[in-house]
Structure formats: C-alpha cells, structure tokens
Amino acid sequence: MYDAIVIGARCAGSPTAMLLARHGYRVLLVDRARFPSDTMSTHYIHQPGVGLLQRWGLREQVAATNCPPVRKQTFDVGPFALTGTPPPVEGAEVGYAPRRRLLDAILLRAASDAGAEVRERFSVDELVWDGDRVTGVRGRTAGGATVTEKARIVVGADGMRSFVARAVDAPAYEVRPGRTCAYYTYWDGLSLEGPELYPREGRMVTAGPTNDGLALVIAFWPREEFRQVRSDIECSFLEAVGLVPSLAARLETGKRAERFLGTGDLPFFFRKPHGPGWALVGDAGYHKDPITAEGITDAFRDADLLAGAIDAGLSGRRPLDDALAEYERTRNEEAMPLYDFTYQLAALETPTPEMQALFGALRGNQHETDRFFGTIAGTVPVAEFFAPENLARIVGGASRTIGLRAA
C-alpha cells in the first residue's frame, strides 16, 4: 500500500513525487515513457520556476547541462524593440530553457533519490475504485505483466489529455477555444542573448537559447490555418520568420539542426483538480497556449502546492478534502491573471491604440520595461502592472518627458 501513486513523471509528476517522498511518504511514480526522452515543449523556465528549483536543490544540476542562463529579453513590436530583464524573485534572477530529455531526467532522478519508487514504461489501464473513491491503479509493466497497486491518493500528472481526468470525469471550467497552432525546430549558428519575441499581425515568432549552442525557434499562426501550415511546414515557417527580416537574415547564416514539431491542439481550460482519492497537477489540471512559455513554471508551482496539500491531509493536520480545495483556490488565484493575458496575446492581433501608447512610453523607461517583462515571467503581478492608473502613470510620464524635451 502506497501513500501516493503519481501517474506521469515529467515536470509536474516528478516534483510532486519528490516532495512527497521528502516528507517521508511511500510514493510510486510511473510513466509509460523511458527516460531520458523528449516531449513536445517550449521548455522555458521563468524566474519563479528557477526559484523553486533552487529551493529544491536542483538549480545547479540544470545549470550544469550547459544550458545558458537568460537575463536579457526582447519584445520586438516592428517599428522598435523593447529590451529588458524581469525583476528577480526568490533569489532567481535568470531563466533557463533546458531540453526536456535533460530536465525531465534530472527531476526523475531527484524523485528517486528522495525515496520514490520509479517505474518507467508502465502503462496505466484503469483506476481501482472502492465505491466512489479512487484507491489505486491497474496497469502493465514493460514486460507485459498486469499489476494492481493501491494508494491513499492517486495523482494524475499525465498531461493535457489526462487519462486520470477522463477516468474520474473531472469537470472543466473557464474553457476557451484554442487560438493558435505552432511549430518549432532547433537552429545551429543562431546567436542569442536571451528570448526574442516578435508579434506580427496574425503571427508570432519567438527564439531563445537552449543546450549545445542551439536555438529554439517557434512560429505561431491562427488555429484556423493549421491544415494549410501542416501541408508545407517549412514553407509556412520560413514565411512567418520572413516577417522579421533581421531574424531571417541571422537564420540564413546557420542551419536547421532538427525536424519540426508542432500541434494545432492548444486549448485553454481549468479542471477541478481533486476528488475522493484523486488529484490532478500540471497540464492535467490546467492548460493554456504556450505562447507565454509558462507550462513548466506552472507545473513546478502546482506540484509544490499539491504536495503541500497532500502532506497536510495525509499527516492529519487538516482534512484532506479541505487541503485539496485550498490547493485549487490558490492555483486558480495565481494562474488566472496570466491565463487571461495569454489568451489576449494568443489572438495574434495588432496591438490596440492603448497598448501601442504603452509600448511607446516604455521605450524611455527601463524600470517599467523590466516590469513589463516581469508580467510575462510571472515576477510582476499582471493586474498590478496593467491597472488603469499604472498605465496612465507610465504613458502620462512619457508624454510629460516628450513635452519637456520639445520645450
């Protein structure tokens, strides 16, 4: 009998298992994949996620993968570009974009080192029930043997198409249709100081440094264009990059190092992340477009929240149902502002006149430019920065400065 079984051993599941094992619980962590292995991902970790890695004692291992630390970021709106550094949080002043085959292996090993039992190539076929309560899992080992395991709680960390979420019929809410489709690849010979974002009408192109001197380059299109894009990915990709001549010229000096990966299935939703004997974490419980590259950072945050809630419940410090309900409330409060911001950015529309005025005002205000980048990184509250009075202060201050110069 385990205290917890965690299904899915990537950036939400392994930290959840690790933290529970560090609290002394008997944990089984399973995944149908073999590690190390890649998975589709923007694989960027913003400062709040790096802060958690540091707290967990794993930051140095990520840094040691030769993934360059990122401080400088660029947001190019066409006529000009904003460059800045998000304010630090929890002592984390940089971001990282490690390849998932490296990051996930570090997280899995940390769970194992903490005492969690790890089973790779284990496929969960069904949940085990006692009345309306989940009490375990039934699945197949790598050798094909059918195994049943029991636990006090089963955690689904098994991604956007979560088997656990379907099996328990977890209600979805705040559901919004996907707005973009995306393809990415890796480029050799593209020198980058940090992430570069290029919003254009009906497109978004991003680029950022990752391991082994490679750059990750991503293009986003409206979801309605997915079939056309998929019919000739390379041509569509180069057409999108061509909207940024400076980036296109730099790409020409290097070469594509790997194949294209992409999808047209990028929905927005929250799911109720708990019920009798079960919980959800990571993309299984909450998903949004990757255009703001928040997935890993969110997964780390939610794993930390969920492990704390499960510990509070299993230890008897408070009723488990109450602790899990608090986990849901906290997750939603912290996630919703960036959820809304991401939904707006994924529209791939020309900035409104108000946003154009803001960008223009930020050009001469490095402090507020850094705070703008902090809204994307999650180190500056979105609601605080985009409050009407704050925007009026920034834009008004720029107008006064221009007036003084003219005088």
Image: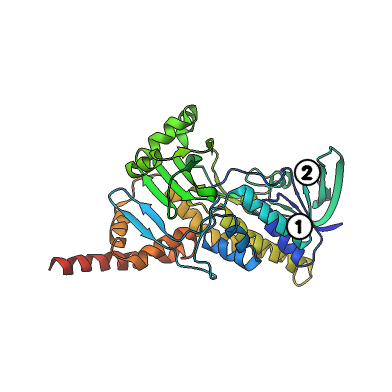
Would you identify the image quadrant in which residue 382 lies?
bottom left
Residue depicted at x 67% and y 55%: 106
Q: Is residue 319 above or below residue 127?
A: below
Residue at the extreme top: 231
Quadrant of the image occupied by residue 205: top left
Q: Residue at x 17, y 69 (%)?
A: 404
Where residue 232 appears, as percent x and y from the top left, is: 47, 28
Element type at marker 2? loop
Q: What label does residue 112 carry, if any? A: 1
Q: Give neighbour class at mark 1: few <14, some 14-19, many 20+ (Cα, 10 Å).
A: many
Q: Are marks 2 and 1 in contact (CB under 8 Å)?
A: no
Disc nearer the start of the sequence (2/1): 1
Q: Which mark is residue 122?
A: 2
How far apart marks 2 and 1 lie (CA) works out to 16 Å
**Residue 215 visible in the picture:** yes
Q: Nearer the viewer, mark 2 or mark 1?
A: 1
Image quarter where the C terminus lies is bottom left
Residue at the image position 43 percent from the left and 45 percent from the top: 190
The extreme bottom residue here reads: 317
Pinpoint residue 354: horizontal percent, then vertical percent.
31, 56
Amino acid type for the residue under numbered disc 1: Ser
Using the image as rendered, state which of residue 359 and residue 44 is in the foreground. 44
Q: How is the image coloured?
A: rainbow
Label at residue 145: none
Amino acid identity at mark 2: Phe
